[in-house]
Image: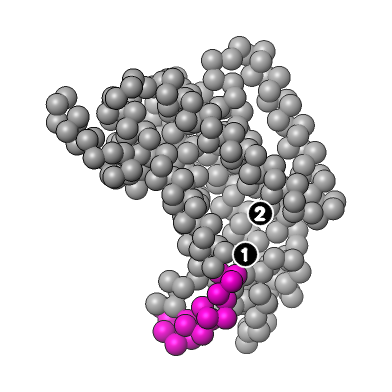
Amino acid sequence: MVSHSSFDPFWGPPTCKSNFCEEDYAMTRYIGEFINTLTNLVYVIYAIHGIRSLRQKKNASAFRAIPYWGLMAVGICSAAFHGSLKYHTQMMDDLSMQLTTTPVLHRVLTVNSSQRTSTAVAILLSVLLVSFATFHVITDELILHSASFVVSVTIIGIRTMQLINLRTEPGAAARRQIWGLVKFGAVIFNVGYVVWLLDGWACEFLKSARATIGLPWAFLLELHGWWHICTGIGAYIFIAVVDHLASGEDHRDIDRSFAWPAPWASRSIFAGKDIGVDEKRK
């Protein structure tokens, strides 16, 4: 939703086709949507943590970091979009989601595959990614773009569940910890989707409430920013879990190898009430 502002936009009038409930250029003439831009730091911070964690591991392939670089690209491209409100940066934001899911999709599809098979799948996914991206930019359609993203996420979710059952022992504390991570990641991702919907449906109410509350507490009602925070956490957890399972690493101290709030989630109600008992027996 485009809003009027007293600032003269540094980037010129908005040309994007998607605009959200946050008032445009309300804080500064250099940033179109201040909170929606700032909250993209979540993606970048988690990406940096993931990359640094991999570099501390022995014999960790550089290819394992590709999903984290994709997550960083989401944060950068989304910040560029919300900061400038231009059509070309909107396309960057849309396509960055595919840049994140495609490497993860490749990882879950090629576990224990030969180098030849892994290369063939990589080429196929790359061709599909370029085809979808080209079609999306030329036609500006959202159905195929959204459908391909949903299909990718669904396949990743199914394969992640299969990998948990294949790579962990039934009844083991490690299995429940990983399930706790996955369940929490799914829940927080869906919470983000709900607040994304509310940002559009209840925009007039939110604008009125923000005007009544005033700054800085009004920032808490910028719901699209919460979408960034929730999906950033959820995406990081799934990337980290898939990387851990696909690499076949030791499950001991898995909760300590992930960034917050993953350690909490691995021992929370999402992991089951008996997790603490199992840990005490070790």
Residue density around tag 1, few if under 14, some if 14–19, many if 20 or more, within 10 Å: many
Residue 96: image location, x then y, percent: 65, 47
- The residue at which mark 2 appears reads as 93
Q: Is residue 235 above or below residue 13?
A: above
Furthest toward the left, the residue is 281
In magenta, the rendered stretch is: 199-216
Residue 98: image location, x then y, percent: 66, 43
Q: How many marks?
A: 2
Mark 1 falls on what kind of element? helix
Residue 250: image location, x then y, percent: 34, 21
Q: Is residue 124 above or below residue 144?
A: above
Closer to the camera in the image, 42 or 108: 108
- The residue at which mark 1 appears reads as 82
Mark 2 falls on what kind of element? helix
The tag earlier along the polypeptide, 1 or 2, is 1
Q: Please name the residue shown 39% across and 45% down the image.
A: 184
Residue density around tag 2, few if under 14, some if 14–19, many if 20 or more, within 10 Å: many
Q: Please name the residue shown 37% across and 33% down the image.
A: 178
State left or right for residue 220 relative to residue 172: right
Q: Say whether residue 262 is visible.
A: yes
Q: Is residue 14 above or below residue 144?
A: below
Q: Are marks 1 and 2 in contact (CB under 8 Å)?
A: yes
Residue 106 colored in magenta in the image: no
The amino acid type found where label 1 is placed reads His
Instruction: Give the CA distance from mark 1 to mark 2.
Output: 9 Å
